[in-house]
Image (spheres, rainbow, N blue to C red):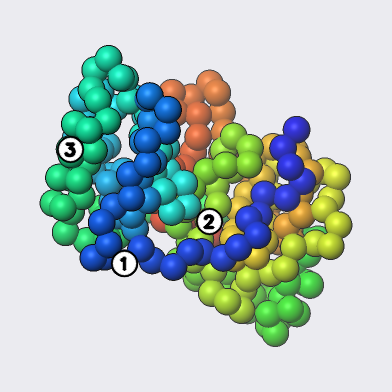
Amino acid sequence: MPDADPGLPRDLPPDWPPDRPPGLTPLGDGALLLRPVRARALLAELGRRPLPGVLEAVPALDALLLRYDPLGTDPGRLAAALEERLAALETAAGAPGRTLTLPVAFGGPDLAWCAAHAGLDVSAFVEAVCAAPLEVAFLGFTPGFAFLSGLPPHLQMPRLPTPRARVPAGSVALGGPWAGVYPRDTPGGWRLIGHTDAPLFDLARPDPVWWQAGDRVRLVPADA
């Protein structure tokens, strides 16, 4: 069972200075941890042009974990190739991801509380949430759960003092600087503002997870 609260006890980290060299840390004999601000751009670049020997690229909030085959490459050669790719990237933002639209039936048990906390009526609060430029920062907590960044400060909600023992699948929630959707029934401590029927995780699909890091997400009222 996952932890009761998917939120992280911190805000988004400061940008990695563009003139700072990438931080490459070996992890055992089959992985490298990369920590530049261009990790997101590098992830997109590796999707377009995979590097020989790299088995998997796993994005986190401010880092990229690369698993590689030690029989197919070595960390020195891989690090040199990564630094070459990073030097060729023109922007820190990287290539844009997909733009996804998520229909939401607003009416969660915390919606009125969140609107009051933001100093708005419910209608204006929903409009502001739908206008927020959300982006999948990374995946975690439970399969299919995306940490969505981009909430302006007045829409960032404190987590519940006591997490709920069960949050229904499809619940759209706010917690700290994040927005998210619970893909299945779990405990949870975020504020629930709505519900979506979108299948965010389905093992029957070729790609079970509906969204990926770098995707931009737009919430829209389900009845709009």
- At horizontal 56% and vertical 28% (from top left) the residue drawn is 202
Seen from the viewer's position, the closer of residues 191 and 125 is 191
Estimate the spatial distance between the alpha carbons at disc 1 and disc 3, rounded to whole Å.
Answer: 21 Å
Instruction: Name which residue type carries label 1.
Output: Pro
Q: Which label was assigned to residue 81?
A: 3
Q: Which residue is mark 2?
A: 148
Q: In the structure shown, which secondary structural element does the residue marked by tag 3 occupy? A: helix
Give the residue furthest to the top: 71
Instruction: Name which residue type carries label 2.
Output: Leu
From the viewer's perspective, tell me whether residue 26 is left or right of residue 112: left
Q: Which residue is mark 1?
A: 17
Instruction: Name which residue type carries label 3.
Output: Ala
Q: Between disc 2 and disc 3, whose residue precedes?
A: 3
Estimate the spatial distance between the alpha carbons at disc 1 and disc 2, rounded to whole Å.
Answer: 23 Å
From the viewer's perspective, tell me whether residue 204 is left or right of residue 166: left
Residue 12: percent from left, percent from top: 51, 64
Residue 94: percent from left, percent from top: 26, 55
